[in-house]
Amino acid sequence: MLLGACRLKFDRNKVAFLSPLLVVAGFSLVCCGAGPSTSTTSSTRLTTRVVASQSVSSPTAFPGLLIIDGEIDTLVRGGEIGAGSSPGLMAMSPDRATLLAFNSTVNNWAVEIVGTAKAAQSGSVQLPGPTTSMVALDSGFGYAAVPSAPFEAGPSPGAVEVMNLPAASLAATISIPNAQTVVSSPSGSQLLVFSGDSDVVTIMAPDLVNSGNPVTATLSGFDRPVNAVFSTDGNTAYVLNCGAQCGGTQASVQILNLSTTPPALGALIPVNGATIGFLAGSTLYVAGTGTPTGPLCTSIPSAAPTAATYCGTLDLVNLTTLQDPYYNNPATEIAITDGYHDRIDMSVNGQLFVGSQGCTNIGNVDNPQGEVRGCLSIFNTTNAAVVIPPDNGDVTGLQSFTSREVEYVAEGGNLRVYDTLIDSLLPPNNYIETGTIIITGYIIDVKAIDFF
């Protein structure tokens, strides 16, 4: 359901949000016509398209992918893309020609394929189980980590499912026990696969699939690795060791040299926590909690006063000196929200957005009284200030733009628009009144399908 001119009047002096509970129960704005929240431009003629996945089906909510005009933050009239009955996680090919959306229902899992040129679904690939990580390559192939995938020739369940996207079919199943996360190099010539409760990294060569040659190689010497960030040339991977947070010993960044044969381990840099990272120049931003709970917020002098007991940390690793000056140094540690950090993005003007799931929520954004806190942290890379926005819920999607100083954030089922000049919700304008793009349902992920 697309929304036009809304009949509900918002108080401009207050930030009004829709809670996921009310939305799921069927509460919605009653809207019609091409009002300020709806764009009438055809989605295929726009060059500033953003897609949001909406996963709830109700009398007033249509599950699917919704197209937004990212220049003016409005839904596009007639811009729905069918993508199953509960689409959530999305992945975009580097050339932005293909969008993948994971659709999950009871005992039925599929990856929906969308061609962005026509903004239409082109096929669907069934998976043998759920996934929380997938990549799409310019080569026309996609890869999904499925930890529960049965595989008779493998020692235990788990695989990377290889998808032929033009044919909308499975091309191969590569056995990797308990495969949880798959990360692609910039060129797509190498994939790193991370398995749960494991101290090894699997290196996968996509070009060797179905060639008769070995497709994977495992490398040991890690400490519960969960993710990686590649250098721009793809020769180096900065592997994030979750350490004690994931049942290991110590969080760290392990440098992996992929230009040698075989690949070789380089320097090991201890950090306070490491589950997600972002590379900007010679600085690697790394977020995590380091332990199952994270440090006490009161133990970090920079932490703002909060009712939350535990905090996460953000480290800035200097890749020139291969040191982390924030490690084990409470006087300089940067406090962020707790939870499992698995979303990170940087705006065009250097505001780092870090999102987590399962964090400590404080207060009620729908009835704010005192502190309101959720799973989003914003770090200003210019002055090192940290903002914890007054919102609730898991952060499940982030999207920045090169032509606008805004960030789209899917948090708690809502799609927020942040003005990155002030690190707060976008002030009211002719198109958006509350800093939220009002969509009936529950938003899981958000991706720009055009370059802008």
Image (cartoon, rainbow, N blue to C red):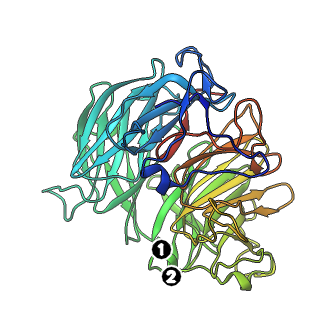
For the residue pair 442 and 244, the one nearer the viewer reads as 442
What label sits on residue 223 in the rendered view?
1
Residue closest to the eye, 215 or 384: 384
Q: Is residue 18 above or below residue 187?
A: below
Is residue 152 shown left or right of residue 401?
Answer: left
Under tag 1, what secondary structure?
loop
Q: Would residue 184 be visible to someone looking at this image?
A: no
389 left or right, relative to 98: right
Q: Quadrant of the C terminus?
A: top right
- Are discs 2 and 1 less than 8 Å apart at CB? yes
Please state if 430 lies on the left or on the right of 148 as rendered: right
Tell me residue 440's x, y (percent).
49, 41
User: Residue visible at 62% across and 65% down?
Assistant: 364
Q: Which residue is mark 2?
A: 249
Q: Nearer the viewer, residue 215 or 418?
A: 418
Label 2: state its secondary structure: loop
